[in-house]
C-alpha cells in the first residue's frame, strides 16, 4: 500500500507538470476534468488504465467499470478535486489483486 501511494503521488506530480502527450495516467481525461462534465472521457481513461495495469480490455459501459467509476466519482465528490480521484484510481489499480497477477 505504501509503495502504491508513493508511486502514484510521484506519478500525479509528474503528470501535472507534463504536456498532455507525455502523460501515462491522465491521457484521455485531464487533471481538471470532472465527472459531471467529462464522464465519457473519464470512463475511456479508466478503460485504458485497466488494460495497462490489469490486462483487461473492457467494452464501453461494461459493468466491470462501475466500481472504478464509483471510486473516481466518490473521491472527487469528497475531495472536490479530480486529481485526488485519479490518485485514488491509481492506488486502487496498483493494490488490486489483478495488478499482481498480470
Image: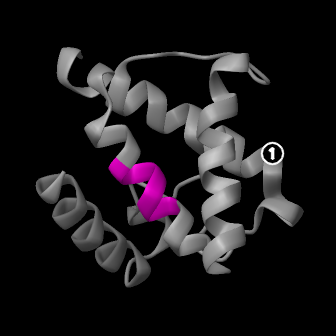
> For the magenta stretch, what is the residue range?
86-91
Residue at x-position 37% and y-position 84%: 17
Secondary structure that dominates the magenta span: helix
Callout count: 1
22 or 81, which lies in front? 81
Q: Is residue 50 left or right of residue 97?
A: right
- From where the camera sits, is residue 66 visible? yes
Q: What percent of the width, then of the height, locates residue 73?
A: 70, 56
Depth order, front residue of 60/69 = 69
Q: Secondary structure at mark 1?
A: helix
Any part of residue 81 in sight? no
Q: Residue at x 42, y 63 (%)?
A: 87
Q: Magenta includes 5? A: no
Tell me residue 26's x, y (percent).
50, 59
Q: Position of residue 27 (x, y in %)?
A: 53, 55
Residue 96 located left or right of residue 7: right
Vertical relation: 92 (above or below) 59: below
In the image, what residue occupies the spot 36% across and 23% down? 54
Residue 89 magenta: yes
Q: Quadrant of residue 36?
A: bottom right
Which residue does the numbered mark 1 point to in the structure image?
40
Percent coordinates x, y for residue 48 in the rendering = 52, 35
Q: Would you identify the image quadrant in which residue 79 lies?
A: bottom right
What coloring was used for the rendering? Answer: one colour
Q: Is residue 28 above or below residue 86?
A: above
Q: Which image quarter holds the C terminus?
A: top left
Amino acid at each position: 500500500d505504501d509503495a502504491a501511494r508513493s508511486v502514484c503521488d510521484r506519478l500525479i506530480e509528474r503528470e501535472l507538470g507534463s504536456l498532455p502527450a507525455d502523460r501515462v495516467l491522465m491521457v484521455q481525461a485531464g487533471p481538471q476534468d470532472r465527472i459531471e462534465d467529462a464522464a465519457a472521457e473519464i470512463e475511456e481513461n479508466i478503460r485504458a488504465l485497466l488494460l495497462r495495469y490489469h490486462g483487461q480490455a473492457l467494452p464501453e459501459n461494461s459493468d466491470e467499470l462501475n466500481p472504478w467509476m464509483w471510486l473516481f466519482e466518490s473521491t472527487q465528490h469528497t475531495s472536490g478535486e479530480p486529481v485526488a480521484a485519479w490518485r485514488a484510481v491509481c492506488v486502487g489499480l496498483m493494490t488490486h489483486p489483478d495488478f499482481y497477477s498480470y
